[in-house]
Amino acid sequence: SELLRVEGLKVAVEGKEILKGLDLTINTGETHVIMGTNGAGKSTLFNAVMGNPQYAVTAGRIFFEGRDITDQPVNERAKAGIFMAFQSPIAVQGISVENFIRNAKSTVSGEPQRIMPFRKKMHKQMEGLMMDRSYGDRYVNDGFSGGERKKTEILQMCMLEPKLAMLDEIDSGLDVDAVRIVSEAVSEYHNESNAILVITHHSEILQKLIPDYVHILINGRIVKTGNAKLIQEIEANGYDAFKEQAK
Ligand code: ADP
Ligand code: MG
Ligand code: MG
């Protein structure tokens, strides 16, 4: 069934139009990949869907499960089941990974999370991600390597159990083993009642994750939608052919 529908979306950041009329529909059970040139507006799309107030919607609508969420604040969207893993996760001083995720889970689910069952579940997920349990007690991303930050984002996703998981370059800066682990974790999370939307520049993240659709985003618009073969085409020939179409 339909999860996300973006219609004619225009988004401005600091007064500059970045998304210039973007359409995208995602159904449950699907995996979508967004590729595109640097600065095309990929992260802007995620921020707009998440409701980051720095990204002003100037035209178009965003629907989630058929409801217009265009004017909803971030926390309402998170409660509705939208999650975004950041391209550059920041450190949060003074709060441990475990408490951070447990608070977030209590908020999005509307149910207080009891410490022991939550911890047990989190440790199980950490095992899958090959993260030492000690990360649960550390301050969020404080002194974490790039790869550890990305794994922490995926740990959050696994615990929050969103319907729509938007992963922004979750594979950037990861070594080959970490990419495989993250790819497996996301693939394991994916099921018929949720959807995955991934921004990536590399095909390695798709080892275990089979994309149903690949979209090319250039200059604020999706200029082409295809299947996984599109990725090979881009890896071989770059974006030049699509840039022409974007004009
Ligand atoms: P992509 O993720 O496709 O590389 P982004 O969506 O991050 O591109 O950025 C698109 C454009 O919007 C870029 O020119 C970028 O500098 C600008 N931009 C994005 N976010 C911000 C922001 N918070 N403040 C100022 N400019 C921004
Ligand atoms: Mg699927
Ligand atoms: Mg980006």
Image: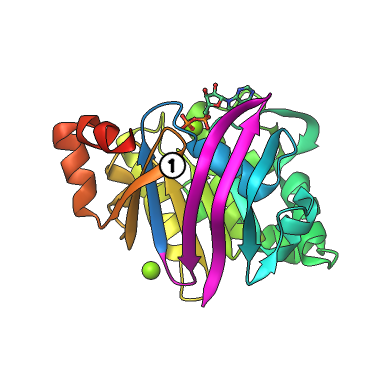
Q: Position of residue 123 (x, y in %)?
A: 61, 55
Residue 184 to residue 66: above or below: above
Rendering colour mode:
rainbow
Residue 13 inside the magenta-drawn segment:
yes
Residue shown at 47% from the left, 57% from the top: 24
**Residue 154 in sight in this render:** yes
Q: Position of residue 58 (x, y in %)?
A: 67, 41
- The quarter holding residue 29 reads bottom left
Q: Is residue 62 left or right of residue 115?
A: left
Residue 191 to residue 81: above or below: below
Residue shown at 60% from the left, 47% from the top: 84
Mark 1: secondary structure: strand
Which amino acid lies under the numbered mark 1 shown in the image of this protein? Answer: Arg
Residue 178 inside the magenta-drawn segment:
no
Q: How many marks?
A: 1
Q: Quadrant of the C terminus?
A: top left
Q: Identify the residue under disc 1.
A: 221
Q: Position of residue 106 (x, y in %)?
A: 81, 60
Query: What is the span of residues highlighted in magenta in the rendered image?
Result: 1-30
Residue 138 to residue 70: above or below: above
Q: Position of residue 107 (x, y in %)?
A: 82, 58
- The quarter holding residue 55 reads top right
